[in-house]
Image (cartoon, grey):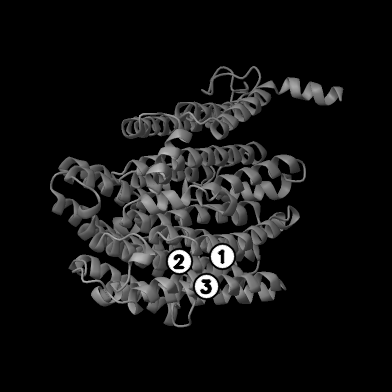
């Protein structure tokens, strides 16, 4: 029994959350059972992915290849738990467990009705399963299906809040995201027409020999992928849906949407660009220049727009746009250090932004104040929540000892190594701007006199989740160890062995 | 020029799919009626389905079932058609979800015009 589970662990990582998601509605009214089951499946998932990651590390980076249904590669669907897959599985599981714990305490204040809460958890688990699938699948069409599952559950999570603006933000998100899915499907179609394969490895080998015969078709495919995944990942000029969607969603949903969902699409784009198209071809089409340039613009514009927002969750949402810019910049540098930085930033931003959104959500549900200027004295009344917010802010700015520093440091080294001093300057400037939009929140919360209102700390489960995430930020910053090893190995896979 | 034109004519399903894609995408981006946006999405997705199925087609190809009497016969590639079945299912569920959202928006704003909804929401925010 255990041997069977162990042999099929990669596929269980994907279908276990999906299966529980389909079971949940049958006992939707029993909220405690639903919450317990969700937390249980996330905890088991974390254990399983940690085991897989240890296995990959022990094998020295050799991927675990799982053939779904026993059909081998060009015909069947392959799941490949390599360095990248293990890395992102670990990030997904590590972030979604604390968010689930938090949601079990806080969701009753943000979503009314036991049945609606159960449906929220269904979407939450579907998103988790789809993200796990995206990180390990090696099949282009499978990528499309999982991207669609993730998109629909993201839109559902956005529309979970009862306010009418929630439905509006969800509709705008759905329309743009579906436009993006159409583009992705088109890109897959062009690649399939040229190469005749949907398996990424076979497509890559075929593309390397035939691209010179059809440069325009390959160019079309790449631009379709860039626009399609760009819309979904909120890459700079295509980010317009993000601030509305991420600020109106219930706070646990904002946390996973900003922290994980957006990253899932980036991981898929990375796979397509680096595994299928390959770094040499990217240079031929000067994609790397485009990524670095748009990344720099995203960092600056996103941060400046965040400075102007008074609504706390909107400010955090614009900050996500800027941090996505960092990841694309690191990808575009095309060297191992920059790529490692981008991958590590995916992990650290996932944890940090979840902590920020959860802390902001706790402040909003406990005090009813949504604007930064109204938060005077929150720090004294809610020391744990604001303490975690402060740690996460320091992490996002990139102070040493916190996780944000490691990723930004590698990206800085990468940009200096590539001789791109402008990118290095923008990375530093982005950190300063980040301090500019996060530190005023801390200043208002701690150093302004508190009003007489009786504001309480949130419940035990919310505090536990916040402390877990804060510990994660600190641990990743001081002993990044295995996660950094996986990121480094994944970056080397992307750039060297192609 | 004549060679280009004849190539375009031979590959007319692809041309049709390009035209449909442009119609769909421009409808999504320029119309403010929520239903028209949704219809634009559907047209755009149909264009991509058409492209896939055209890519799998072989002129004069048979149904892809192995015929023992005539094993060398040319047959169409079944994979794109199978993939597009999945694509159609996805597109239907997106449409259903979007229609549900439109119903909710109509209940709370009394209109299906995206621009009017944005104006009303901003009006609420200003007050």
Whether residue A33 sits left or right of residue A107 in the image: it is: left
Q: CA distance from mark 1 to mark 2?
A: 10 Å
Front label number (1 vs 3): 1
Q: Which residue occupies the foreground of this view, A451 or A209?
A: A451
- Asked if disc 1 and disc 2 are in contact, CB closer than 8 Å, the reply is yes
- Asked if disc 1 and disc 3 are in contact, CB closer than 8 Å, the reply is yes
Whether residue A363 sits left or right of residue A169 in the image: it is: left
Does residue A362 appear in this view? Answer: yes
Q: CA distance from mark 1 to mark 3?
A: 9 Å
- Asked if disc 3 and disc 2 are in contact, CB closer than 8 Å, the reply is yes
Whether residue A318 sits left or right of residue B17 in the image: it is: left
In x, y percent, where is residue A27? 15, 43
Residue A426 vertical placement versus A283 (above, below): below
* Secondary structure of residue under mark 1: helix
In x, y percent, where is residue A419? 72, 73
Residue at the disc numbered 3 = A407
Q: Residue furthest front?
A: B127
Residue at the disc numbered 1 = A326
Residue at screen point 23% across, 43% down: A116
In x, y percent, where is residue B50? 58, 26
Q: Which mark is residue A209?
A: none
Residue A261 vertical placement versus B104 (above, below): below
Q: Chain of mark 3?
A: A
The N terminus of chain A sits in image quarter: bottom left
Residue at the disc numbered 2 = A349
* Between discs 1 and 2, the one toward the N terminus: 1
* Between discs 3 and 2, the one toward the N terminus: 2
Q: Chain of mark 2?
A: A
């Amino acid at each position: 029994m255990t041997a069977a589970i162990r042999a099929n662990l990669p596929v269980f990582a994907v279908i276990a959350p999906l299966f529980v998601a389909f079971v949940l509605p049958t006992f939707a009214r029993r909220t405690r059972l639903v919450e317990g089951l969700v937390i249980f499946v996330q905890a088991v998932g974390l254990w399983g992915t940690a085991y897989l990651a240890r296995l990959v590390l022990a094998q020295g980076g050799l991927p675990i290849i799982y053939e779904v249904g026993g059909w081998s590669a060009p015909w069947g669907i392959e799941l490949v738990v390599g360095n990248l897959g293990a890395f992102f599985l670990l990030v997904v599981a590590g972030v979604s467990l604390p968010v689930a714990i938090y949601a079990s305490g806080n969701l009753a204040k943000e979503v009314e009705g036991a049945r609606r809460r159960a449906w929220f958890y269904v979407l939450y688990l579907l998103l988790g399963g789809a993200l796990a699938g995206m990180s390990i699948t090696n099949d282009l069409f499978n990528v499309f299906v999982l991207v669609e599952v993730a998109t629909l559950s993201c839109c559902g999570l956005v529309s979970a809040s009862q306010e009418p603006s929630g439905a509006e933000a969800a509709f705008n998100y759905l329309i743009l995201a579906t436009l993006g899915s159409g583009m992705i499907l088109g890109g897959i179609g062009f690649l399939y027409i040229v190469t005749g394969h949907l398996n990424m490895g076979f497509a890559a080998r075929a593309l390397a020999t035939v691209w010179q015969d059809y440069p325009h078709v390959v160019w079309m495919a790449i631009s379709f992928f860039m626009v399609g995944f760009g819309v979904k990942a909120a890459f700079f000029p295509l980010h317009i849906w993000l601030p509305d969607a991420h600020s109106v969603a219930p706070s646990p949903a904002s946390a996973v949407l900003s922290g994980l969902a957006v990253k899932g699409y980036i991981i898929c784009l990375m796979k397509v660009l680096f595994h299928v198209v390959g770094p040499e071809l990217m240079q031929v089409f000067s994609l790397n220049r485009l990524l670095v340039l748009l990344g720099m613009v995203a960092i600056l514009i996103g941060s400046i727009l965040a400075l102007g927002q008074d609504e706390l969750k909107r400010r955090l949402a614009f900050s996500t746009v800027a941090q996505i810019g960092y990841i694309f910049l690191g990808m575009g540098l095309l060297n191992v250090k920059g790529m490692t930085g981008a991958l590590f930033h995916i992990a650290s931003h996932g944890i940090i932004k979840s902590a920020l959104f959860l802390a902001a959500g706790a402040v909003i549900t406990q005090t009813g104040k949504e604007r930064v200027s109204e938060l005077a004295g929150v720090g004294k009344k809610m020391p744990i929540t604001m303490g975690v917010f402060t740690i996460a802010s320091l992490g996002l700015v990139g102070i040493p000892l916190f996780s944000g520093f490691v990723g930004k440091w590698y990206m800085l080294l990468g940009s200096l190594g590539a001789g791109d001093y402008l990118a290095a300057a923008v990375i530093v400037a982005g950190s300063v701007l980040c301090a500019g939009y996060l530190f005023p929140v801390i200043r208002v919360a701690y150093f302004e006199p508190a009003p007489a209102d009786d504001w309480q700390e949130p419940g035990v489960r919310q505090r536990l989740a916040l402390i877990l995430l804060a510990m994660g930020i600190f641990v990743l910053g001081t002993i990044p160890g295995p996660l950094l090893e996986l990121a480094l190995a994944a970056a080397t896979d992307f750039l060297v062995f192609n | 020029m004549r060679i280009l034109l004849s190539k375009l004519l031979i590959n007319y399903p692809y041309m049709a799919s390009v035209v449909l894609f442009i119609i769909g995408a421009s409808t999504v981006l320029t119309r403010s009626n929520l239903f028209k946006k949704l219809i634009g999405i559907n047209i755009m997705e149909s264009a991509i389905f058409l492209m896939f199925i055209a890519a799998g087609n072989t002129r004069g190809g048979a149904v892809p079932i192995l015929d023992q009497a005539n094993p060398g016969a040319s047959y169409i590639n079944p994979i794109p058609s199978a993939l597009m079945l999945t694509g159609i299912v996805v597109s239907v569920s997106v449409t259903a979800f979007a229609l549900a959202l439109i119903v909710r928006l109509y209940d709370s704003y009394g209109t299906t015009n995206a621009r009017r909804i944005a104006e009303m929401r901003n009006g609420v925010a200003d007050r």
